[in-house]
Amino acid sequence: MDVQTWTYIIVGASFALYIGIAIWSRAGSTKEFYVAGGGVSPLANGMATAADWMSAASFISMAGIISFAGYDGATYLMGWTGGYVLLALLLAPYLRKFGKFTVPDFIGDRYYSKTARSVAVICALIVSFTYVAGQMRGVGVVFSRFLEVDINTGVIIGMIIVLFYAVLGGMKGITYTQVAQYCVLIFAFMVPAIFISIQMTGNPVPQLGMGGTVADGSGTYLLDKLNGLSTELGFSEYTDGSKSLTDVFAITLALMVGTAGLPHVIVRFFTVKKVKDARKSAGLALLFIAILYTTAPAVAVFARTNLIETVSDKEYATMPAWFKNWEKTGLLKYEDKNQDGKIQYYNEKSKNEEFLAAAEEKGLKGNELTIDNDIMVLANPEIAQLPNWVIALVAAGGLAAALSTAAGLLLVISSSVSHDLIKKMVKPDISEKGELIAARLSAVVAVCIAGYFGINPPGFVAAVVALAFGLAAASFFPAIILGIFYKRMNKEGAVGGMVVGLALMLFYMLKFKFGIFDGGQEAVESLKPDWWFGISPEGFGTIAMIVNFAVAIIINQFTPPPPQDVQEIVENIRIPSGAGEAVDH
């Protein structure tokens, strides 16, 4: 059977499974809608947390960005992994003990202020919409290639699927759907990685294969071979970094603390019965996440090596079917600049003048191949000529990763509107049924907005998601940390810090990522030398977070301390004792 038929079968079967689970576990109360009734087992919650957290950025885009950026791409790997550890060990148990469903709920009650709650709702919506845009983009990329529809149609199909099980099942439906999605995505990621590792190095363990020798008997290490292939094309050695140490540190830290402030991951720790179960599920989730995260660098190396060997200086007419299929999506483009019928793939921006002079002498007129980072994981099995069912399985895995996180984010958006805005501020006497209807309606609106951002994305998946992490770092993280560990922190300090941190991050994003104030997207490249402290927009969340902390603490010193009862609550949540179910009061 061809790839498309296999894709219809495997993706169709996985969608039927997700929808079946959503119908079986549909939410009948607000508690089931927001936190799955608080009765999920640690194992199921660990798998669901892993699926929720490993988005399209992890599955589709992370190996893609490492594939092209080499050593520099490792910042995403370190930042996201370190961030999860930070969240699981430093924040989750305390937030669980505080007993609030949502981050705005925690901030509203901890800082005894409707203004603080409103600011937190705005932050949650901005972070979640930025993040969900990356997921919908991922859905569009998968559908555009494997169902041979354009990206926009792919996004709309994804919107309909995710809306169905998110709106019907709420957190209860999403949790059990995400258990299934974790199984699909991890199987889909590992099977081709194992196949290609055996093919290229003879070692079935991808992590070991990446550091091993190639299977041609030459005794050459795979990474040495890739370094050689990269330098021949004018790129820096794959294992060398080009980013400054300051920017690497800033991006890594922004991703770490951004992870710890992500509302859709934090809410996962309320879906279990006890604080002990929250800790167990956090540990299990880390184990499940590590399987994919330790494999991603190997997949990146395999994909980059195979791509260079397949396309560089080869006749365009002899390109295999996968090349032409990806061309149809617009995510891979070939332009024959010197009219010789061959694909010249090289670094035309290389700083090596000898290399560029040699290229010009050969009659080359610039790089002729444009490859979107996001296609590397999906195209990898095709480039390696794996069986069609493996290629279709990867498509199903990519969709599982994107849809699982999109669903979690949509729930955060809907609960921010229905629970934190309507019930807590606009209409406190709303009935449970009315609140559930409001949650579902806000999820519908959220899906439509997310779909728009998926059709008009501000960048490739990992970059969009990195900006969401920067926004979370700039807004939520200081308020949560100070709320747990500094009982003197008051509402004026927290609100001031969040507003200044978020505004600073948004300004920097708009200026240096989108060129809003300097001539639009075309001007972005020319603005790079003007980055503040040499830090990219993806890493600027670190600076905005530091400013947030400073503003909060300074304002706090000149304003009254919080009421005694609030200080006692803060003291209490740090005492390591058992706690009951999450309460809504």
Image (tube, rainbow, N blue to C red):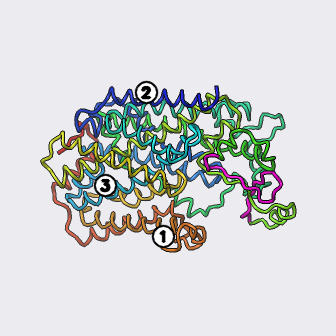
Give how far apart the Cα atoms at labels 1 and 3 are: 38 Å
User: Foreground mark, 2 or 3?
Assistant: 2
**At numbered mark 1, what does the secondary structure look like: helix, strand or loop?**
loop
User: Foreground mark, 1 or 3?
Assistant: 1
The disc placed on residue 17 is 2
Q: Which residues are magenta?
A: 328-350
Give how far apart the Cα atoms at labels 2 and 3 are: 43 Å
**At numbered mark 2, what does the secondary structure look like: helix, strand or loop?**
helix
Residue located beneath label 3 in the image: 485
Magenta span: predominant SS is loop
Which of the two labelled residues, at mark 2 and mark 3, occupies the earlier sequence position?
Answer: 2
> In the image, what residue occupies the spot 28% across and 38% down?
33
**Is 174 placed left or right of 84 in the picture?**
left
Residue positioned most to the left = 429
The disc placed on residue 516 is 1
Can residue 273 be spotted in the picture? no
Q: Quadrant of the C terminus?
A: top left
**Is 226 placed left or right of 328 in the picture?**
right
> In the image, what residue occupies the spot 33% across and 63% down?
498
**At numbered mark 3, what does the secondary structure look like: helix, strand or loop?**
helix
Q: Give the percent coordinates (x, y) of residue 157.
A: 46, 40
Residue 204 against residue 230 in the figure, above or below: above
Q: Give the percent coordinates (x, y) of residue 302.
A: 69, 41
Give how far apart the Cα atoms at labels 1 and 2 are: 43 Å
